[in-house]
Image (cartoon, grey):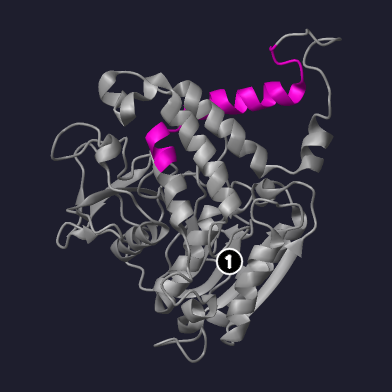
């Protein structure tokens, strides 16, 4: 059983308009059990769809967003007014062609754009969840997405694609539901979060929690907002999304609107002004507690942990000897040469594990100096790789060039 929230319009798939997100309540018949052991008796998922689901319901593509992303993939964001975060990738005639594929993207649970998370009202207490919201994992996010996909009438996804934390979700889909996925595109990601990345996340969390306006996580009920802490967290994280070469090319040591240094602590350098702008604009669209929860979910991610510490064991189900029904999952992993947050070595480790179970896998490293965020930017070779992999598998799958 699923139900729409009051004041929420839930539309059927097909030809949905580019409109405010749809929100659906899932998991009401059977409580949704999280990895922490906590059960949610119904939870909200906000989502968008683009394109048309074909008659056979075989052309669905699930797009998984990164840490601070959301479900506004290919349309103007209702808060920032900016284009969708993957507007270069998803749309008519683009690598994920909405004239051919039915694209689904949901806001992950734990986030702050309509899905169940610490910012939302607890339907039992009538107050924001805040830190009473249970800690979630990447696997929890994927289980919630599976319920949404089933709600939309899709038995098997043609493709699951995503970068960074989205790539973690893609890998989890392949391991948890190999029968439900035809092909997978994990981009700029890893099978587990490194100690360095956990350390960066901890710096961000401590910045938030050190802000007096955080109020022990209860700031929504107190009428405050830890904007300074969240801004610093974003600034620190944003540095990791770029390469040194990209920072130098964009800013170097150029001064910001001045001819000489001020011998003070204003933003003398352009790079300082840029980071401050990133921090300020971020707090307008994101929730501080959600940042805590989602970074923790990434920290906990380790596909091999439940498989004797051997990554190949996790992927056994995706290969020719492990899949219960249908064909083995097809993979294409993509990394970027200047990505030091999720370096190419992490993707190679996944490829080696897949090769060891004879999985169908290809791998491409894109040469670029744009760093981790390259998957969100204009990288022609990257988009050619995605288009080639997706359309090639569509032909093998027998999907029509257009729907309708």
Res. 142 image quadrant = bottom left
Q: Which residue is mark 1?
A: 185
Residue 283 falls within the magenta-colored stretch? yes
Residue 152 lies, with reference to residue 372, above or below; the image says below
Residue 24 lies, with reference to residue 236, above or below; the image says below
- Position of residue 129 measured from the top left corner of the image (x, y, whole percent): 25, 37
For the record, the magenta segment spans 265-292
Residue extending farthest to the bottom is: 321
Left or right: 339, with 118 as reference point? right
- Position of residue 86 measured from the top left corner of the image (x, y, whole percent): 58, 48
Q: How many marks?
A: 1
**In this view of the protein, which residue sits in the foreground, 31 or 344?**
344
Residue 279 lies, with reference to residue 357, above or below; the image says above
**In this view of the protein, which residue sits in the foreground, 235 or 53?**
235
Can residue 288 be seen here? The reply is yes
Can residue 102 be seen here? The reply is no
Left or right: 185, with 325 as reference point? right
- Position of residue 295 measured from the top left corner of the image (x, y, whole percent): 46, 46
Q: Quadrant of the N terminus?
A: bottom left
Secondary structure, magenta segment, majority class: helix
Left or right: 102, with 97 as reference point? left
Residue extending farthest to the right is: 259
Query: Looking at the image, which residue is at 51% across and 36% down?
Result: 204
**In this view of the protein, which residue sits in the foreground, 51 or 277?**
277
Left or right: 24, with 86 as reference point? left
Mark 1 Cα-neighbour bin, 10 Å: few <14, some 14–19, many ≥20: many
Query: Looking at the image, which residue is at 75% across and 15% down?
Result: 268
**In this view of the protein, which residue sits in the foreground, 189 or 395?**
189
Query: Looking at the image, which residue is at 53% across and 37% down?
Result: 203
Residue 121 falls within the magenta-colored stretch? no
């Amino acid at each position: 059983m699923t139900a729409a929230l009051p004041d929420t319009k839930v539309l059927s798939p097909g030809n949905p308009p580019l409109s405010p997100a749809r929100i659906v309540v899932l998991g009401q018949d059977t409580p949704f059990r999280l990895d922490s052991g906590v059960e949610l008796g119904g939870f909200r998922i906000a989502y968008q769809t683009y394109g048309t689901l074909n008659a056979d319901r075989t052309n669905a593509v699930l797009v998984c967003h990164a840490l601070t992303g959301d479900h506004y993939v290919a349309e103007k964001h209702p808060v920032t007014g900016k284009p969708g975060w993957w507007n270069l990738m998803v749309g008519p005639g683009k690598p994920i062609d909405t004239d051919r594929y039915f694209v689904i993207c949901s806001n992950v649970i734990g986030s702050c754009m309509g899905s169940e998370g610490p910012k939302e009202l607890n339907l039992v207490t009538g107050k924001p969840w805040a830190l009473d919201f249970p800690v979630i994992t990447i696997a929890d996010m994927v289980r919630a997405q599976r319920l949404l996909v089933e709600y939309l009438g899709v038995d098997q996804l043609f493709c699951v694609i995503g970068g960074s934390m989205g790539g973690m979700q893609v890998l989890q889909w392949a391991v948890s539901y190999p029968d439900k996925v035809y092909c997978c595109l994990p981009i700029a990601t890893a099978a587990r979060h490194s100690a360095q990345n956990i350390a960066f996340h901890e710096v961000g969390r401590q910045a938030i929690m050190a802000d007096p306006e955080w109020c022990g996580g209860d700031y929504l009920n107190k009428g405050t907002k830890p904007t300074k802490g969240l801004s610093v967290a974003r600034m620190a994280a944003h540095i990791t999304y770029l390469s040194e070469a990209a920072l130098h090319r964009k800013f170097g040591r150029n001064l910001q609107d001045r001819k000489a240094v001020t011998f003070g602590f204003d933003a003398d350098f352009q790079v300082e002004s840029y980071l401050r702008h990133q921090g300020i604009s971020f707090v307008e669209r994101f929730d501080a507690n959600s940042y805590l929860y989602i970074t923790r979910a990434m920290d906990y991610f380790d596909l091999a942990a439940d498989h004797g510490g051997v990554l190949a064991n996790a992927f056994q189900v995706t290969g020719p000897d492990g899949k219960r029904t249908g064909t083995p999952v097809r993979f294409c992993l993509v990394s970027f040469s200047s990505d030091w947050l999720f370096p190419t070595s992490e993707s190679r480790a996944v490829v080696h594990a897949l090769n060891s179970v004879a999985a169908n896998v290809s791998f491409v490293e894109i040469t670029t100096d744009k760093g981790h965020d390259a998957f969100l930017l204009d990288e022609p070779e990257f988009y050619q790789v995605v288009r080639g992999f997706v359309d090639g598998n569509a032909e093998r799958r027998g999907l029509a060039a257009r729907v309708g």
